[in-house]
Image (spheres, rainbow, N blue to C red):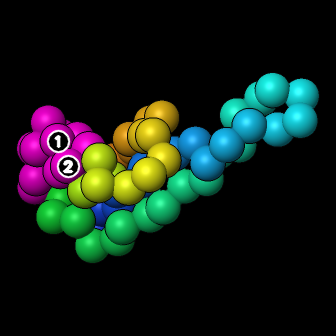
Amino acid sequence: MPLNSTLVVVYQTGLTPAGGPILRQKSLSDVRSDAAEQAVYEAAHALFGLAVHPVIDVLYRKNFELVDE
């Protein structure tokens, strides 16, 4: 049984003094658990495409309760 879903977007805010990326993430909870993965991916890029920082990764976490039927 689906419980909940969360969209996590990882984005880069800058570089460290050593030249490595500084990464941050933003989570959006209560995403429809029956949403298509491609639709969630496209929505994430549409939303975060408006931001200054580039999107590095998009994660779609789904939580389920496993029940004995």
Q: Is residue 39 magenta?
A: yes
SS of the residue under disc 2: helix
Q: Is residue 2 magenta?
A: no
How far across and down, in percent of the image, does residue 26 sit? Answer: 48, 61
Q: Which residue is mark 2?
A: 46
| Predominant SS of the magenta segment | helix
**What are the residue bounds of the magenta stretch?**
34-46
- Which residue is pictured at 77% across the width and 29% down the height? 20
Above-or-below relation of 67 to 29: above
Image quadrant assignment for residue 5 = bottom left
Is there any visible trace of residue 1 in the rendered image? no
Q: What residue appears at the point 82 percent right and 38 percent down from the top-left corner? A: 16
Location of the N terminus by quadrant is bottom left
66 or 22, which is in the foreground? 22
Name the kind of residue labelled 2 in the image.
Ala
Q: Locate residue 58: give its quadrant.
A: top left
Identified at 44% across, 52% down, the residue is 52
State left or right for residue 16 relative to residue 14. right
Looking at the rendered structure, the secondary structure element under dot 1 is helix
The answer to whether residue 2 is left or right of residue 23 is: left
Q: Provide the residue designation for mark 1.
A: 42
Instruction: Give the number of the disc on residue 8.
Output: none
Q: Is residue 36 left or right of residue 45?
A: left
Q: Amino acid at mark 1?
A: Glu
Q: Are marks 2 and 1 in contact (CB under 8 Å)?
A: yes
**Residues under labels 2 and 1: Cα distance?**
6 Å
Q: Can you name the residue that lies furthest to the top here?
A: 19
Residue 13: tell me if it is visible.
yes
**What is the x, y in percent for residue 69?**
18, 57
At x 81%, y 26%, the residue is 19
